[in-house]
């Protein structure tokens, strides 16, 4: 929730080019409201609608920046793929909710908007996430060895790309979400740049053990998670249960970083032990302390960044939803039942024509 990332992408057969990229920081009031809407509260329907409008205006600003940077007109763009901001993800209850007003986004930009990618997969019995493994396979898959692409956003997800097989993919656990929430609570910062604050702390083993007791970590794929399960109230509860609420705040930050790293490493160990190499993307790939810890935990496998394959770490997720929108626009399925557990391939997203 630190901001909105966008790319303007060109696709032609197997050619993918990023023509422009843009980022806008999330206004603090909107960020706070989106976080609050992850929990039950008063007047949620009205507040969610207003937040969706505000987010869509922000998305439209990013689109306009992309068009200016690329010297491109709206009429030259086939569609916008917009995931929206997740505030509830409850596939076991049959729903997921991402805030975005697709009609308004199409109206503000003059471009067809494709939104709500997860719901159809959930309707077909799937988890609705992760949706990026098919894209990772298309862009990063190779024929001579097994490779993983791990996206570390608010939550981390893994795509295992094996030659001549459908990829597998699933959520690993918290990525940046808890670290960002804790440093924001303690220091008013949106994120721990480079993991600098975490690096000054020490891992508290009792706290780490308590955090790893979360039932999610015992689930086998297909699995997905979100802020419904991992949030500050949950963290505070574990601090009390493990009698660690009085330890230094920097030690809690370091332990949360270890949780994120361990969630990924344990997922590899249990569900993708045959990996030959790992590539990281997402905001967490810019956290040097986290990357270094993953290199230690996943050794002897090399752990590198997707920038080495030609796509910058902070562009992969936005590019994935451009790719998914293109599939929807062309009438092609976007999900993988081997990943989400859905009954079969489905056309994803709701289309708001320009």
Image (cartoon, rainbow, N blue to C red):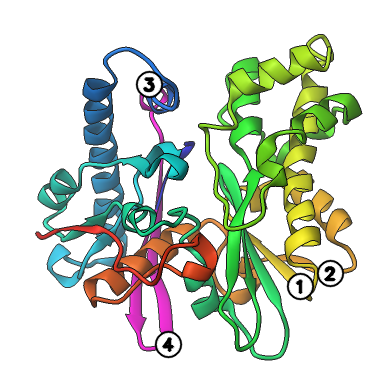
Question: What residue appears at the point 60 percent right and 69 percent down from the top-left corner?
Answer: 168
Question: Can you identify the residue that label 4 sits on?
Answer: 14
Q: Residue at x 27, y 69 (%)?
A: 328
Nearest the viewer among 287 and 167 is 167
Look at the image and say whether residue 234 sits in the magenta stretch: no
Separation (CA) of disc 1 from disc 3: 40 Å
Image location (x, y in percent) of residue 242: 82, 17
Indicate left or right for 259 with 125 as reference: right
Residue 277, labelled with which disc?
1
- Residue 20 shows in the view: yes
Which label sits on residue 117?
none
What is the C-alpha distance between the residues marked 3 and 4?
41 Å
Q: CA distance from mark 1 to mark 4?
A: 23 Å
Q: Are marks 1 and 4 in contact (CB under 8 Å)?
A: no
Ranked by sequence position, the earlier of labels 3 and 2 is: 3
Task: In the rendered structure, find residue 29 and report the number of the disc placed on it.
Answer: 3
Q: Badge 4: few (under 14), some or many (20 or more) residues near its Cα, within 10 Å?
A: few
User: What residue range appears in magenta?
Assistant: 6-30
Dot 1, how many residues are within 10 Å of its Cα: few (below 14), some (14-19), or many (20+)? some
Q: Using the numbered discs, state the Cα–Cα distance from disc 3 to disc 2 in whole angstroms.
A: 42 Å
**Quarter-of-image position of residue 205:** top right
Above-or-below relation of 9 to 99:
below
């Amino acid at each position: 929730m630190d901001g909105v990332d966008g790319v303007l992408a060109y696709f032609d057969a197997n050619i993918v080019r990023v023509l422009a990229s843009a980022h806008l920081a999330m206004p603090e009031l909107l960020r706070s409201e989106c976080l609050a809407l992850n929990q039950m509260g008063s007047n949620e329907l009205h507040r969610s609608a207003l937040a969706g409008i505000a987010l869509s205006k922000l998305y439209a600003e990013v689109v306009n920046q992309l068009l200016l940077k690329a010297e491109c007109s709206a009429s030259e763009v086939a569609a916008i793929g917009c995931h929206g901001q997740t505030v509830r993800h409850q596939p076991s209850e049959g729903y997921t909710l991402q805030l975005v007003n697709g009609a308004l986004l199409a109206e503000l930009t003059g471009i067809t908007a494709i939104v709500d990618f997860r719901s159809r997969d959930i309707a077909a019995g799937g988890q609705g996430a992760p949706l990026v493994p098919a894209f990772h396979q298309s862009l990063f898959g190779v024929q001579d060895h097994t490779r993983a692409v791990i996206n570390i956003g608010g939550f981390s997800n893994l795509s295992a790309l094996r030659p001549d097989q459908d990829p597998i993919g699933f959520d690993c656990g918290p990525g940046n979400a808890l670290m960002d929430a804790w440093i924001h609570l303690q220091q008013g910062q949106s994120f721990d740049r480079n993991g600098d604050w975490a690096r000054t702390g020490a891992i508290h083993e009792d706290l780490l053990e308590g955090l790893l007791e979360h039932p999610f970590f015992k689930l086998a794929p297909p699995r997905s998670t979100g802020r419904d399960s991992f949030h500050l109230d949950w963290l505070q509860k574990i601090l009390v249960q493990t009698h660690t609420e009085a330890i230094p705040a920097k030690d809690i930050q370091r332990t949360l970083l270890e949780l994120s790293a361990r969630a990924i490493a344990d997922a590899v160990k249990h569900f993708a032990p045959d990996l030959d190499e790992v590539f990281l993307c997402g905001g967490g790939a810019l956290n040097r302390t986290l990357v270094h810890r993953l290199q230690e935990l996943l050794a002897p496998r090399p752990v590198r960044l997707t920038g080495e394959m030609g796509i910058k770490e902070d562009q992969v997720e936005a590019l994935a939803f451009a790719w998914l929108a293109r599939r929807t626009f062309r009438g092609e399925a976007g999900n993988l039942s081997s990943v989400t557990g859905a009954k079969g391939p489905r056309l994803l997203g709701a289309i708001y024509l320009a």
